[in-house]
Amino acid sequence: MRIVVAEDLYLLRDGLVRLIEACGHQVVATATTGPETLDALRTWRPDVAVIDVRMPPSQSDEGLRAALAARGEMPGLPVLILSQHVEQLYARELLADGSGGVGYLLKESVFDADQFIGALERVAGGGTAMDPAVIAKLLSSGSPSRGLEQLTEREYSVLGLMAEGLSNQAIGRRLFLSESAISKYTTSLFGKLGITDDNDSNRRVRAVLTYLNKPWL
């Protein structure tokens, strides 16, 4: 994969580049400010971008703004956002266009190389990768979307793990159930949410976005 890394802290940026390249991917550009990030995304049109939320010059939401602007110009551009803390507003804005290819991880997740690279590859493939802490924060306010109210407790649990980017096999291991049992739960919840797309990957993305995109978006 061709990847752009946008992070103003040298040590973290260098660590990300080394980790990504050690896993066989190519970092085509790095950026340290919001404007540099947008320029790099426009120039390289990467397979996926890793972007820090807070970047110079304002140290507010420059990274997120660059990501949103780039996705506006290049719909579907895969973006994995990194943040020091869970910020609901930023996560909501990232999910607001209703498409896949997005991820939001806490920076501490980077220290788990397998988790980080797995999330990066899922996002590049058009899926989602949301940190469990981010999901918990998003679901702590508002009321369930229409359709979610019909899910059983088990189906809701399966959907939550799906939002983390887990496969049916991985969800089964987490819940101590067989992969075939998880497949039945996913088929049922897709039906209750009115998701009929033939492509399973698309169905999973749409289900996750329904789960996370609640009325406050």
Image (cartoon, helix red, strand yellow):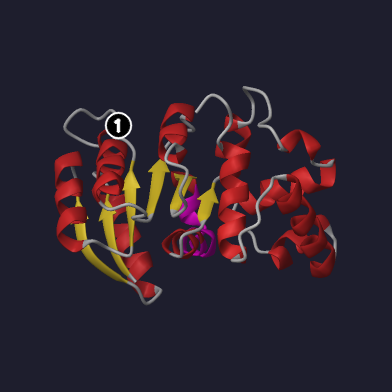
Q: Where is residue 158 in the image (x, y as percent from the top left)?
A: 74, 51
From the image, tell me which residue sits under label 1. 61
Apparent side of residue 7 relative to residue 201 in the rendered image (left or right): left
Q: What residue type is labelled 1?
A: Asp
**Is 43 contained in the magenta span?**
no
Residue 44 vertical placement versus 86 (above, below): below
Apparent side of residue 49 relative to residue 169 in the rendered image (left or right): left
Give the residue at x 79% y 41%. 151
Give the residue at x 17% y 54%. 42
* Quarter residue 83 falls in: top left
Residue 106 visible somewhere in the drawing: yes
Give the residue at x 69% y 32%. 146
Crowding at dot 1, Cα within 10 Å, few <14 / some 14-19 / many 20+, comes out as: some
Q: Position of residue 155 (x, y in %)?
A: 79, 48
Apparent side of residue 93 relative to residue 157 in the rendered image (left or right): left
In the image shown, does 202 or 104 lie closer to the viewer? 202
Q: Where is residue 104 in the image (x, y as percent from the top left)?
A: 46, 45
Give the residue at x 14% y 50%. 39
Q: Position of residue 136 (x, y in %)?
A: 63, 34
State which region is magenta.
109-118
* Quarter residue 200 falls in: bottom right
Q: Main secondary structure of the magenta part?
A: helix
In the image shown, does 25 or 184 lie closer to the viewer? 184
Residue 165 visible somewhere in the drawing: no
